[in-house]
Structures are given as C-alpha cells and as structure tokens.
Image (cartoon, rainbow, N blue to C red):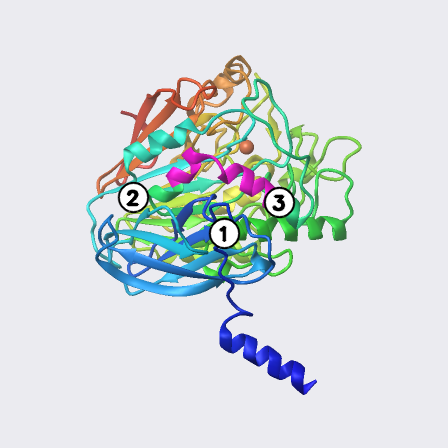
C-alpha cells in the first residue's frame, strides 16, 4: 500500500500522471480548430479540443493571447490540461484584458501549435462603442450543403457571432446531399462526440469560429427532434431520454467556447445568460428547450413532439400555466430586461416568436413547437416589454430555415393592436425548408409578417448604432458548392424608439 502511494507520488512529481507528451502521435491535435466566446470587458473564453489521442490521460496545454497576429506581444498566457473525461476539450477563461480590443490567441500541446484565432473583448460597462456589427445564424445540416455562408460571415468581419441552434443534426434527412453523416443517430456520449467532431471538421465553420467570439444557444437537434424538457417525440422512456440528454449536453459543452459556469451536471446545463456590449446592446441569450412544458396535442399515437393544430380544437394550447422558458428563466429574463440600461435589448433565442396562422381564411392553425405552442408565455413576455417600456426589444431566432421579418404585437389578430417589438428570423446555413408556394398561401392571414422567404440559405448581418439597427438578409446562391456567392436579399432597419422593422 505504502509502496503504491509512494509510486503514485513519484509519478505526480515527474508530471507523468498529469501530463504526457504526445510527440509520438502522428496526427495534428488541433484538427477541430479553435474558438472563442462570451466576451466581457476584461476577458473571453478560449476553446479547443485535442484530437487524435489514443491514451486516456490528461494532456498539458499552453495558451497565449497577444495584441498582434504574429503573437509577439503576448499579454496573457497560462497552462491548463485537457482531460479525457471531457474529451480533451479546453475551456480557458482568460482575464485581465483591455475592453473593446482585438486580440489573437493560440494553443500549444503535444508538440504542436494550433491555428491562431482572432477575438475581441466587449466594451467597458456603460461605455458607448458607437457601433456593433454581428451576424446570427442557425441550422447547419451537414449532409444538405457546404458551409460557404460562413466564408461570407468571415469576410464581413463581425465583432460577434450569435449561433441560435441546430449546430448538429441527429438524423439524416433531406435531398441533394453533398456529403454524409458517418454514423447513424447518436444516443451515447461517444456518438455525440463523433457527430460534433464531424461537423467541426468543416474548414469554413472552423474559420468562422476563429474569426471572432461567439455566443450560442441550442435548439432541438443538438439532442433529438422536437424534444421538450424530459419528453422526446418518440416513445423513449423518461429515464433513458434523460441519459441521452445528458450525453448530448455534455458533448455540446465539450465542443463550444462556453464558460466554466455552464459545465453540465448530468442532464442539466444552464446556458441562458446575458452579454452586454457597453451601453449599446444587451443580449439576453435564452434556452427554450430545456424547461418548456410538453407540446400540447401531439400527433395521434405520440406522447410528445410538435403538431400543427386548429386552435379551437387544441384546448390545452391556451392553458395559462404553459411555459416555454420555465418559471425560473422567465423571472430571470424579466429581471435582466428590467435592469438593462442598454439602448437595444436583443432576445437571442431559437424558435419563431410571432404568431403564424397556417389556415388560410377564417380560423387559425398553429405549429406547436415555436412560441405559437406557448401563447400565454408569449403574451406574458410581450406584455412585460410593453408595460415596462423596455428599450428597443428585438428578438432574433431561427429554426424554420427561412427568413421572416415580423412585427411583434400584443394582439396579432387585431390590426389596431400596437407593435411592441421586432423579430428577425434568420434562414439556415444549409438546412432545407418548406417550398415558398406553401408559405405564400398564408401571407394574407399574417399581415404582421413583413417578409417570409424560404428560398435561400444564408445568415443575417446586423449593424447596431445608438439610433439605428440595420439588418441585411444574406442569401447564398447555392450550398452545393463551397465557394458560392452571397447577396443581400433585403435590408430592414429598426429605428431607436420605434418598435417594428421597416424596409430599408
Ligand atoms: Fe433546424
């Protein structure tokens, strides 16, 4: 016993138990790239994940942040270790940086150096940075296209990217595949890790992560289509599904530039948070999957999952106790909004918020997976925005793989009801959408939807100043080729103090 303890102590002293040099290994350990996220005025999260490792041992990783791209003027550095329990991922919370500054960073491990990433810190609290340029995007089915849209995001040089869900897809579907998932649907931690590694092997996605800091939220496909809290759409029992959710959340943490406070515990992972860009903008980053009430009126024969229902027939839909954020997050959001001193309040979330009537003529049909499935929760939020006169609320979202530009109203059925906020729904990076003709038949029933266009894949580019938000809907010519062109389909503005988008 003593001998064994002494032996272990000796190993630790040598550093052998904690860090093993892997020069012997042939493959490049930074094959998944680098990323940064969640900038504050004094710091930022740096991420990488080492690959190609055979031994299940911790690996020493050195990180450096510099003022220059050549990495000569290093202003912060340190060492950490990548542990096999977390798939050799690295999450460094670098601190002591200057506000509103561009920085460069890299990692060294296993005798190799990572690519150099660019990042930046947020402006000082309460300061006016004059301008914020950000991009938001969602839904990047790997099989359905190349990630050429990310090339155009990189060319725009945004200060920040917000990714709003469906970073991976668990299943194979759609037409015109340009490449294939290398495995079936993931259930275990190993399965999800492999799926993230496949998606993150894409060079255009890596370049976008290396270009600027990201903030992220998830939607359903990071776990399973149409899940709601602990309920999957299929018949999997609760206990098994929570094990699956725990695996999926853990793999998500391992592959995103998330702060330590978001590290998951079993099936629970708090990713909702806020981020301030000086006095100009506050991002309220929401999670409308983990805490939501189960879907109302699922399809016949199913216990969960979305449906499109006649609102007269699905009585449960309008139950005032139904929640999409969960009570705790709802309270948190109200506080975050009420305390905000920002000129713009951006609700960064995953699913469409505006009412979308899918029954031409009298009556209304609603899809239950977005906020239309939780009308009481939506009304609570919109009432709060109006009553508390929250400054310039703008919801950004994804999920439906089409551009939607909407007025958010207290009563969508009343043309005289005031517009209280703006909504920008971005199209998908690659994921396929309903045909435009299907959407067009609903246009007359939804006059608060100023634009509904499912024809293009792409992203949304936003520029915020104290007086104006300018929005460019960026549309790819095709996702069948990496180097395809990208154009601006339409531009909108939101003016300070006037809720609702207007065509630019
Ligand atoms: Fe999606």
Q: Which mark is residue 159?
A: 2
Q: 422 or 472: nearer the eye?
A: 472
- Residue that appears at 67% across and 87% down: 2
Looking at the image, residue 248 lies above or below residue 409: below
Q: Image check: 184 left or right of 150? A: right
Confirm or deny contact between disc 2 and disc 3 (CB under 8 A): no
Q: Which residue is mark 3?
A: 192
Q: Main secondary structure of the magenta part?
A: helix
The label nearer to you, 1 versus 3, is 1
Q: Which residue is mark 1?
A: 50
Q: 281 or 358: nearer the eye?
A: 281
Secondary structure beneath dot 1 equals: loop
- Residue that appears at 45% across and 47% down: 30
Secondary structure beneath dot 2 equals: loop
Q: Position of residue 179 (x, y in %)?
A: 56, 25
Q: CA distance from mark 1 to mark 2?
A: 26 Å
State which quarter of the image contains the C terminus: top left
Confirm or deny contact between disc 1 and disc 2 (CB under 8 A): no
Looking at the image, residue 401 lies above or below residue 361: below
Q: Position of residue 199 (x, y in %)?
A: 52, 37
Marks 1 and 2, the one that precedes in the sequence: 1
| Residue located farthest toward the bottom when viewing the structure as drawn | 2
Q: Is residue 206 magenta?
A: yes
Residue 294 visible in rendering: yes
The label nearer to you, 2 versus 3, is 3
Looking at the image, residue 30 lies above or below residue 97: above
Magenta part of the protein: which range?
193-208
Instruction: Note whether ligand 1 is within 8 Å of mark 2.
Output: no
């Amino acid at each position: 016993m003593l001998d064994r303890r002494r032996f272990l102590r000796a190993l630790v002293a040598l550093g052998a138990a904690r860090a093993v040099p892997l020069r012997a290994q042939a493959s490049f350990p930074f094959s998944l790239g680098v990323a940064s996220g969640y900038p504050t005025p004094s710091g930022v999260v740096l991420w990488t994940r080492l690959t190609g490792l055979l031994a299940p041992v911790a690996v020493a990783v050195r990180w450096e942040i510099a003022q220059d791209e050549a990495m000569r003027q290093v202003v912060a550095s340190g060492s950490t270790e990548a542990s096999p329990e977390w798939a050799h991922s690295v999450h460094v919370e670098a601190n002591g940086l200057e506000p509103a500054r561009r920085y460069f960073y890299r990692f060294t491990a296993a005798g190799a150096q990572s690519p150099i990433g660019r990042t930046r810190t947020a402006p000082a609290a309460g300061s006016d940075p004059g301008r914020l340029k950000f991009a938001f995007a969602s839904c990047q089915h790997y099989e359905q296209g190349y990630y050429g849209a990310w090339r155009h995001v990189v060319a725009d040089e945004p200060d920040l990217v917000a990714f709003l869900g469906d970073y991976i897809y668990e299943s194979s579907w759609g037409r015109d595949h340009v490449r294939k998932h290398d495995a079936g649907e993931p259930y275990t931690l190993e399965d999800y890790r492999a799926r993230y590694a496949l998606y993150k092997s894409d060079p255009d996605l890596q370049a976008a992560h290396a270009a600027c800091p990201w903030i992220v939220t998830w939607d359903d496909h990071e776990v399973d289509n149409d899940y709601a809290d602990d309920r999957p759409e299929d018949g999997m029992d609760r206990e098994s599904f929570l094990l699956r959710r725990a695996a999926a959340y853990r793999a998500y943490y391992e592959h995103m530039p998330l702060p330590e406070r978001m590290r998951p515990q079993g099936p629970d992972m708090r990713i909702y948070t806020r981020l301030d860009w000086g006095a100009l903008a506050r991002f309220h980053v929401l999670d409308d999957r983990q805490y939501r009430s189960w879907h109302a009126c699922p399809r016949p024969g199913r216990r969960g999952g979305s449906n499109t229902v006649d609102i007269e027939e699905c009585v449960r839909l309008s139950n005032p106790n139904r929640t999409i954020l969960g009570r705790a997050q709802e309270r948190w959001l109200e506080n975050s909004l009420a305390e905000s001193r920002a000129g713009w309040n951006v609700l960064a979330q995953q699913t469409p918020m505006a009412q979308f009537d899918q029954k031409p003529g009298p009556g209304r049909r609603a899809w239950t997976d977005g906020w239309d499935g939780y009308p009481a929760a939506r009304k609570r939020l919109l009432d709060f925005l109006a009553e508390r006169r929250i400054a310039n609320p703008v919801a950004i979202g994804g999920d439906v793989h089409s551009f939607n530009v909407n007025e958010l109203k207290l009563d969508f059925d009343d043309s005289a009801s005031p517009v209280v906020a703006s909504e920008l729904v971005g199209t998908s990076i690659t994921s396929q959408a309903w045909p435009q003709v299907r959407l067009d038949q609903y246009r007359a029933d939804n006059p608060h939807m100023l634009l509904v266009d499912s024809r293009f894949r792409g992203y949304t580019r936003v520029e915020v100043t104290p007086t104006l938000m300018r929005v460019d809907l960026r549309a790819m010519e095709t996702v069948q080729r990496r180097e395809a062109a990208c154009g601006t389909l339409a531009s909108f503005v939101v003016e300070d103090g006037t809720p609702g988008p207007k065509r630019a």
